[in-house]
Amino acid sequence: MGFLRRLFSLGGGDRRITHPVFGQLRLMPAKLSAYWEGETELLGRPFSLAIEAPGGTEPGPAQVAFFERYTSHPDAAFEKGADLLVGEYEQWLRKPFPADWREAFAWVALSIPADGDELKPWDLSFECLQGVAARRHFTCYIEREHVVRVEVSG
């Protein structure tokens, strides 16, 4: 019974750590795993993190490398989802996408898969900066290195 309770538990202790790269993190139990939740800053804006933590493990070097690979080159993050992001933007705003993606979006969130493995599911979110979609989040869901869908929320 203990295994099933842990497997499906949404409760748990309030475990927090200070990571040298990610800063203050809080472990968030989930149904089948857990993740570290935190907030840092990127390009002068708040930036949310969700770092997969199988078994409650602390973030490892591969997850740090994943984070640094994208945050040191935000264009790579946008390019990852550009094909679907541009279409969603144009559908919502009914106008052409600007030449510079930073006029349309601010990158605001990233999830980091276990072991920093890009073949595992992960996501990134952009906040729209214009028109009727302003402040809505456009989240790209990535599986096996490809964006499989974009969801708009907010």
Image (cartoon, grey):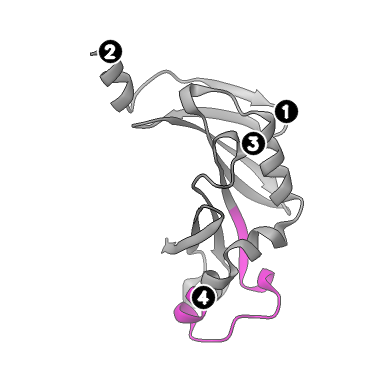
Say which amino acid is labelled 1: Pro
CB under 8 Å between discs 2 and 1: no
Residue with the most extreme left position: 1
Q: Which residue is mark 2?
A: 2
Foreground pick, 19 / 78: 78
Q: Which residue is mark 3?
A: 63
Dot 3: element: helix
Image quadrant occupied by the N terminus? top left
Q: Where residue 152 sits: x, y (%)?
A: 43, 64
Dot 2: element: helix
Q: Which residue is mark 4?
A: 89
User: Considering only order in the chain, which callout, 2 or 3, is on the residue closer to the N terminus?
Assistant: 2
Say which amino acid is labelled 2: Gly
Q: State yes or no: residue 51 in magenta.
A: no
- Residue at left offset 53%, top offset 28%: 26
Locate residue 3: give its quadrant.
top left
Which numbered mark, 2 or 1, is in the foreground of this view?
2
Which numbered mark, 4 or 2, is in the foreground of this view?
2
- Residue at left offset 44%, top offset 63%: 149
Q: Which residue is mark 1?
A: 20
Q: CA distance from mark 4 to mark 3?
A: 30 Å
